[in-house]
């Protein structure tokens, strides 16, 4: 999880989906308390590309780990 602070990343659902569609993602991070209807597409894309999915407890925690002051449902390390 510390890699989110130092490595190249995208934050938020739109950017994460775009990176997944371009096959630029190394690891997907998903907040457990995010609505599944929001995150399901990203999770399915990641699994179909055999990308590891890491679950973070809350959207607040995921935003904090990414050094942003807003809640976020997803983030991803990019290649």
Image (cartoon, rainbow, N blue to C red):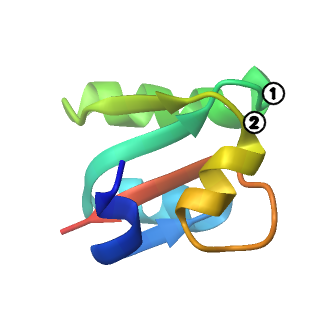
Examine the image and state in which quarter residue 30 appears.
top right
Point out residue 43 in the picture as x, y percentages from the top left corner. Answer: 48, 29
**Residue holding disc 2:** 38
Q: Is residue 21 above or below residue 19?
A: above
Q: Is residue 19 visible?
A: yes
> Residue at horizontal 51%, vertical 59%?
16
User: Total number of numbered labels?
Assistant: 2
List x then y, in percent, for residue 69: 78, 72
Q: Who's the residue at 68% across and 74% down the image?
A: 68
Q: Which mark is residue 77?
A: none
Q: Of helix, strand and loop, which one carries label 1?
A: loop
Q: Position of residue 42 (x, y in %)?
A: 52, 39
Q: Nearer the viewer, residue 70 or 13?
A: 70
Q: Residue at x 76, y 26 (%)?
A: 33
Residue closer to the observer: 28 or 48 = 28
Crowding at mark 1 (Cα within 10 Å: few <14, some 14-19, many 20+): few
Contact flag, marks 1 and 2 (Cβ < 8 Å): yes
Q: Give the left or right position of residue 58, taking residue 6 as reference.
A: right
Query: With 71 as the anchor, is 68 left or right in this view?
Result: left
Q: Is residue 1 above or below residue 4?
A: above
In percent of width and height, residue 74 lies at 59, 48
Q: Badge 2: few (under 14), some or many (20 or more) residues near its Cα, within 10 Å? A: few
Q: Which residue is mark 1?
A: 35
Left or right: 60 with respect to 8? right
Label 1 to label 2: alpha-carbon separation: 5 Å
Q: Is residue 60 left or right of residue 55?
A: right
> Residue at the spot x=35%, y=35% of the render?
46
In the rendered image, which quarter is residue 59 located in? top right
């Amino acid at each position: 999880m510390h890699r989110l602070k130092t490595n190249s990343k995208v934050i938020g659902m739109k950017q994460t989906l775009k990176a997944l569609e371009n096959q630029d993602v190394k690891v997907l991070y998903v907040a457990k308390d995010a609505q599944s209807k929001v995150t399901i597409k990203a999770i399915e894309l990641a699994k179909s590309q055999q990308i590891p999915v890491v679950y973070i407890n809350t959207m607040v925690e995921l935003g904090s780990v990414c050094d942003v002051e807003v809640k976020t449902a997803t983030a991803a390390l990019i290649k």
